[in-house]
């Protein structure tokens, strides 16, 4: 138990107290800002309600600002000299810079509705300071190989510059994948909260089971960033939960994804982090035919509301009359159907699929379990997210012995 010094215990306690205050602050501030945001035209229609009320959007911005203020006020504590922790200021600052740049670019996207072909690169750009810090300080670019592969490639494989490509891709993935698992109340903040709590659990497991000092420091670092994140996210989720009184906006999705990616990279647990993102990975792969336009991709792929019952059903996609679906698109859909991952509503005379569910996890869940209320759909997704985390812990702490350690 001596791995965590007394000073570090105190620092962690301070972090928890500050995070609770940040959460309460977010909780009371957000409702007061609603009118201001609506007046500033930062608003959107809640499309899955019969009356489609106008709600303020981008409330992820004040949430992220309260988070940043909390971190700024917290920075001195790990450095007060009677604490023994040897934390690197550059590391903390590069992480904050990456998160802050992402918030800025996310806000730009909310206000200006940037095209996908440009915004897809935003996170990688915001992550550059972080990668430069990584390069000048740690520079570790090798990955440990599973035992089965070691006879062929050695124990460690140095990815060299490819490791930076991997980090950039991880950052891009984390930010956008949260943004596209969206469309019903509570889902963006809810998934981020479950992942955040999983990261905390993983950090604590490490800190209290690991005699290795450097990984303890890496996980303490992760906790300093994630505890306040969980604090402000809980408050945001409270207001965004069904029936939502506000929307989180792309600002929040980017902020959340970047914060998680940053701690995964600097805390050296990016592979474990990816296990927590299993639902997002599935949703991304499943979306690919639409994201890469093999299949028509409407502006909104969120589920549909049945006006008679008020329940949600999966939304469907039909090829555009001007642009019929290509052979590749049809093949992708047939593959998904063969895997039981597609609900087809209409075929044409040649047996080609002309109407099926939109390719998102939300619609898939509704295709099988629906119709469901909006609240229950959110709960179903969050249960899937929690199961994924449990699975991640199982893989990380049980199965890993099969392939990793000698
Ligand atoms: C992403 C998805 C899109 C989905 C949208 C929903 C992809 C490629 N893009 O787009 O399919 O429809 O998120 O957020 O998968 N809204 C609600 N209820 C909610 C949340 C959002 O009605 O609980 C609506 C509101 O009108 C809100 C809008 O969605 O204004 C926000 O959409 P936005 O975040 O701009 O969409 P994208 O992130 O571009
Ligand atoms: Mg969005």
Image: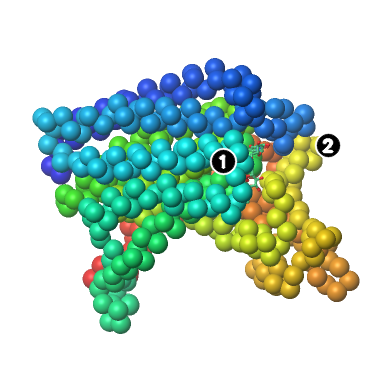
For the N terminus, the image quarter is top left
Counting residues from the N terminus, which is met first, the one under dot 2 or under dot 1?
Answer: 1
User: Is residue 334 or residue 1 the one in the foreground?
Assistant: 334
Residue at image coords 52%, 57%: 281
Q: Residue at x 38, y 57 (%)?
A: 167
- Between 381 and 227, which is closer to the camera in this rendering? 227
Crowd band around label 2 with a 10 angstrom C-alpha radius: few (<14), some (14–19), many (20+): few
Q: Residue at x 26, y 71 (%)?
A: 156
| Residue 348 sits above or below residue 14 on the image | below
Q: Position of residue 229 (x, y in %)?
A: 40, 35
Give the number of the disc on residue 308: 2
Q: Would you say residue 193 is visible in this rendering?
A: no
Q: Position of residue 9 (x, y in %)?
A: 20, 33
- Residue 384 or residue 277, whichever sits in front: 277
Residue 247: image tag: none
Q: Quadrant of residue 297?
A: bottom right
Mark number displayed over residue 109: 1
Q: Secondary structure at mark 2?
A: loop
Does residue 318 appear left or right of residue 70 in this picture? right
263 on left or right of 318: left
Figure quadrant of the C terminus: bottom left
In the displayed structure, would residue 88 be above or below residue 352? Answer: above
Q: Position of residue 112 (x, y in %)?
A: 60, 39
Q: Is residue 259 above or below residue 29?
A: below
Q: How many marks?
A: 2
Does the rendering let one see residue 99? Answer: yes
SS at badge 1: helix
């Amino acid at each position: 138990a001596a791995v965590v010094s007394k000073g570090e215990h105190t620092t962690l306690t301070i972090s928890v107290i500050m995070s609770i205050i940040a959460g309460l602050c977010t909780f009371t501030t957000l409702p007061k800002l609603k009118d201001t945001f609506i007046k500033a035209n930062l608003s959107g229609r809640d499309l899955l309600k019969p009356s489609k009320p106008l709600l303020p959007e981008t409330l992820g911005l004040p949430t992220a600002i309260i988070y940043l203020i909390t971190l700024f006020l917290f920075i001195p504590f790990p450095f007060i000299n009677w604490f023994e922790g040897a934390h690197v200021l550059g590391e903390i600052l590069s992480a904050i810079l990456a998160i802050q740049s992402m918030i800025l670019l996310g806000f730009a996207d909310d206000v200006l509705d940037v095209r996908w072909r440009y915004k897809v690169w935003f996170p990688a750009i915001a992550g550059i300071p972080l990668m430069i810090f990584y390069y000048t300080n740690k520079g570790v670019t090798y990955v440990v190989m599973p035992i089965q592969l070691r006879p062929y490639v050695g124990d460690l494989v140095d990815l060299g510059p490819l490791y930076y490509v991997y980090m950039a891709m991880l950052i891009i993935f984390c930010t956008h994948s949260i943004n596209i698992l969206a469309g019903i109340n509570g889902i963006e903040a809810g998934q981020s909260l479950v992942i955040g709590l999983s990261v905390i659990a993983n950090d604590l497991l490490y800190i209290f089971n690991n005699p290795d000092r450097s990984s303890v420091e890496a996980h303490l670092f992760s906790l300093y960033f994630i505890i306040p994140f969980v604090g402000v996210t809980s408050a945001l989720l409270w207001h965004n939960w069904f029936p939502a009184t506000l929307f989180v906006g792309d600002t929040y999705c980017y902020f959340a994804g970047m914060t998680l990616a940053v701690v995964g990279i600097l805390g050296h647990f990016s592979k474990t982090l990816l296990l927590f993102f299993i639902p997002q990975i599935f949703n991304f792969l499943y979306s690919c035919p639409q994201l890469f336009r093999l299949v028509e991709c409407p502006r909104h792929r969120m589920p549909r509301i049945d006006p008679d019952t008020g329940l949600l059903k999966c939304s469907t996609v039909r090829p555009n009359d001007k642009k019929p679906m290509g052979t590749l698109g049809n093949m992708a859909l047939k593959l998904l159907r063969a895997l039981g991952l597609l609900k087809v509503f209409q075929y044409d005379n040649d047996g080609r699929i002309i109407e099926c569910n939109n390719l998102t996890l939300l619609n898939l869940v509704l295709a099988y379990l629906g119709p469901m209320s909006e609240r229950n759909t959110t709960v179903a997704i969050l249960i899937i997210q929690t199961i994924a985390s449990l699975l991640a812990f199982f893989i990380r702490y049980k199965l890993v012995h099969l392939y990793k350690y000698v």
